[in-house]
Image (tube, rainbow, N blue to C red):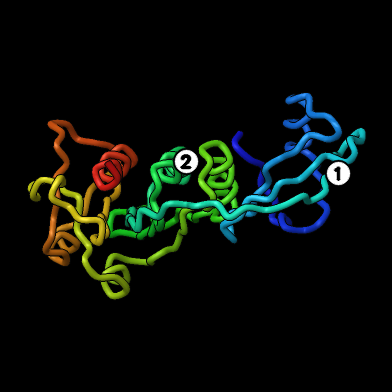
Amino acid sequence: MVFLYSKNCSDEYLQIENEQFKHLRARRVKVGDRLDVRNLKDGYNYIYEIREILRKSINLELIFKNSVEDKKSNISIAWAVVEDSVIEKTLPSLNEIGVERLIFVYCDFSQKNIKLNFERFERILISSSQQCGRNSILEMEICQSSDELKDKFSKISLVDFGGENIDNANKDEILFIGPEGGFSKREKNMFEKKYALNSPYILRSNTAILAATSKMIL
């Protein structure tokens, strides 16, 4: 873990409890040790010193703060809603790769009964950033249909069979990855630009989004 997360980070005093307390105890921290704590919002890291170790909590005092450069990729990806368990497994990788914005879309072939738990997603992303050192988490939003996505954003390109080589994609485009069943004929006709992944195999939705995103980053 590169740093600790606290939404109250920047307060003069912090109290660490529960899972984070267990983590610090496992690290055998002691009074006087200094910890990097961040809120993933304001671009700073805050250095706290351990003042007291109690039976179920650790008390910290703020010493100073630093501005942390967090390089922006400016990459936005649209992803058709799939099973939440699949999303949860994929989110950390997208966050670590550096995706700035992830737009979930209820496509024609998406399962409409799937309800996305953004609070749980955020906890997963926070844990990911603590592990990889990213001083933010990717932003998330929902479009209720492909039509709404098209109305809200420009330069949307489908990742689909038969398109041009994805190596030609630009970072100012929003790559749109479909559900397991692919895009409907209606949706394919909605968007003119299409890219194809360089794979001879049929990819699962979560594999496709990681492959497409990696092409944009690397």
**x, y percent for residue 58:** 85, 39
- Residue 25 versus residue 146: which sits nearer the camera? 25
Callout 1 secondary element? strand
Q: Is residue 144 left or right of residue 28?
A: left
Task: Report crowding for label 1: few under 14, some 14 to 19, many 20 or more residues within 10 A (C-alpha).
Answer: some
Residue 127 spot, x, y in % from top left: 58, 41
What number is the disc on residue 92?
A: 2
Query: Viewer-proximal residue, 6 or 119?
Result: 6
Residue that carries the numbered disc 1 in the rendered image: 59
**Circle 1 or circle 2, nearest the eye:** 1
Q: Which residue occupies the foreground of this view, 167 or 124?
A: 167
Label placed on residue 216: none
Tag 2: residue type? Answer: Pro
Left or right placement of residue 45 versus residue 16 in this view? left
Q: Quadrant of the C terminus?
A: top left
The residue at 42%/52% (across/down) is 71
Residue found at x 48% / y 52% = 70
The part of the image, by quadrant, that contains residue 141 is bottom left
- Mark 1 or 2 closer to N-term? 1
x, y percentage for residue 134? 51, 46
Alpha carbons under labels 1 and 2: distance apart: 29 Å
- Mark 2 nearby-residue class (10 Å; few <14, some 14–19, many ≥20): many
